[in-house]
């Protein structure tokens, strides 16, 4: 059995190296959109390693460890392949294109350290997967609920991505704001469903009878992901770019549509 501190340090170092590789790829291809796909695959690898690593007193991975590993792998493959395909066929993500303009000649140096921050964020998020897999309790109803949350998350994100792709593929929509399907209820439904998936890991990890108190650490995953998406690298830079490119049309969209949770916005009397 690998001591837990050694396991965490090893996975964290691996994430750092993989994001160095992402930096080299984006530099060579002159398209930073690739880093999102690499980050997703890297986090998936970290989660699978954490899930399947031998736990204390267990020679072989248990049912929950295998279930968490499979779900992490499916999430990573679904999102990573989508991001890979989007980057391969489209222009550079607007967030990174703006970084390139803002940082100018210092872009590559700042991008390197920005990606190391992303590696650190991935290391924090992966701890939720570790805590979920290490819960020693037998599988039960709470695990079924966690599985349902993850299925809804992956399906919802996939639907949102497909709706946006279909909208953008129509030449008649060039320069317009996508406000159909889930995008009529939320300006970022894909982000919401990605965040929702992280809520499954505390459900796997937390033991309400106090048998596995460290399971509460898994709450750090959805908390960190919410902060990143809503306040840091998700919504803020994307909305700034949309306001620059869509102007009044996007302001009107903001006024009538929630930013995150896909629910109808209450009308002001």
Image (cartoon, helix red, strand yellow):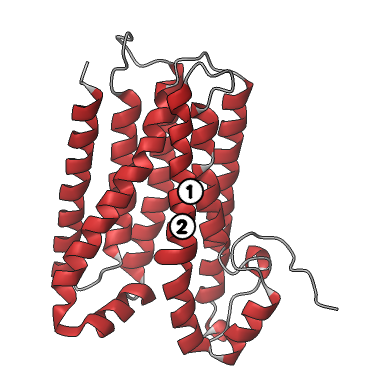
- The one nearer the camera, 33 or 100, is 100
Instruction: Report the residue that reaches farthest toward the right.
Output: 269
Q: Find disc 1 in the rendering and name its residue.
A: 223
Above-or-below relation of 222 to 161: above
**SS state under label 2:** helix
At horizontal 60% and vertical 85% (from top left) the residue drawn is 251
Instruction: Report the residue that reaches farthest toward the bottom.
Output: 248
The location of residue 181, given as percent across then percent down, is 67, 65
**CA distance separating discs 1 and 2:** 6 Å
Which image quadrant is residue 253 in?
A: bottom right
At horizontal 28% and vertical 46% (from top left) the residue drawn is 42
Quadrant placement of the C terminus: bottom right
Quadrant placement of the N terminus: top left
The disc placed on residue 227 is: 2
> In this view of the protein, can residue 66 be seen by the observer?
no
Q: Do the residues labelled 1 and 2 touch (CB within 8 Å)?
A: yes
At horizontal 29% and vertical 17% (from top left) the residue drawn is 54
The location of residue 205, given as percent across then percent down, is 49, 28
């Amino acid at each position: 059995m690998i001591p837990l501190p050694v396991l965490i340090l090893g996975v964290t170092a691996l994430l750092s190296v993989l994001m160095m590789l992402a930096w080299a790829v984006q530099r060579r291809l002159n398209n930073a959109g690739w880093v999102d796909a690499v980050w997703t695959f890297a986090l998936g690898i970290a989660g699978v390693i954490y899930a399947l690593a031998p736990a204390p007193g267990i020679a072989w991975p248990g049912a929950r460890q295998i279930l968490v590993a499979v779900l992490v792998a499916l999430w990573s493959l679904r999102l990573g392949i989508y991001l890979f395909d989007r980057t391969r066929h489209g222009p550079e993500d607007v967030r990174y294109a703006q970084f390139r303009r803002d940082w100018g000649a210092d872009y590559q140096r700042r991008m390197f350290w920005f990606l190391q921050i992303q590696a650190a964020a991935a290391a924090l998020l992966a701890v939720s997967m570790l805590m979920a897999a290490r819960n020693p309790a037998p599988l039960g109803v709470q695990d079924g609920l966690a599985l349902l949350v993850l299925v809804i998350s992956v399906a919802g994100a996939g639907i949102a991505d497909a709706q946006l792709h279909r909208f953008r593929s129509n030449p008649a929509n060039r320069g317009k704001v996508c406000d159909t399907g889930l995008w009529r209820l939320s300006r970022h439904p894909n982000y919401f469903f990605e965040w929702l998936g992280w809520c499954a890991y505390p459900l796997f990890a937390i033991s309400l009878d106090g048998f596995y108190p460290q399971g509460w650490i898994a709450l750090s995953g959805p908390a960190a992901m919410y902060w990143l998406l809503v306040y840091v690298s998700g919504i803020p830079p994307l909305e700034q770019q949309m306001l620059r490119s869509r102007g009044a049309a996007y302001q009107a969209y903001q006024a009538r549509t929630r930013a995150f949770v896909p629910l109808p916005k209450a009308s002001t009397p």
